[in-house]
Image: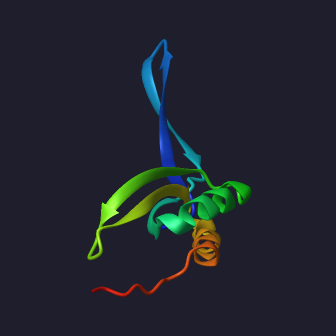
Amino acid sequence: MDNFTSCHTINKSTAYGIIRTLKYERCVRMKLVIAVVQDQDSNRLSSALTKNNFRATKLATTGGFLRAGNTTFIVGTEETKVPKLLEVIRENCRAREQMVS
């Protein structure tokens, strides 16, 4: 498949009826990234996402084995920007160990 995809169909009315014309545009492929992070990392990650021009929806969530508070970030971005988004997430979040008694 070529790099161009039919994104819109335009109908023109003329004296002879309707002529259907396809307009080809470069479509941007988008990806939806869902990141569940620990509450301790959420403010730092939120600031870093904004600083790097990513817009996110932030949801407070709870669950998992320890029933700990988490934050879920939902980020829609262009496919080409996904590696940068994952880099920002990795730089601002970390794994933690917790003792269970």
Residue 38 visible, this orientation: yes
Which residue corresponds to the image point at 49% horizontal and 83% vertical from the top-left? Answer: 95
Residue located farthest toward the front when viewing the structure as drawn: 101
Percent of width and height locating residue 6 = 49, 48
Residue 2 visible, this orientation: no
Count of numbered badges drawn on the protein: 0
Percent of width and height locating residue 11 = 47, 26
Res. 50 image quadrant = bottom right
Res. 20 image quadrant = top left
Which residue corresponds to the image point at 64% horizontal and 77% vertical from the top-left? Answer: 91
Closest to the observer: 92 or 34?
A: 92
Closest to the observer: 40 or 57?
A: 40
Which residue corresponds to the image point at 38% horizontal and 63% vertical from the top-left? Answer: 69
Compared with 40, 27 (above or below) is: above
**In what quadrant of the picture does the C terminus appear?**
bottom left
Percent of width and height locating residue 56 = 54, 52
Residue located farthest toward the top when viewing the structure as drawn: 15
Compared with 27, 37 (above or below) is: below
Percent of width and height locating residue 49 = 64, 59
Compared with 38, 55 (above or below) is: above
Compared with 86, 59 (above or below) is: above
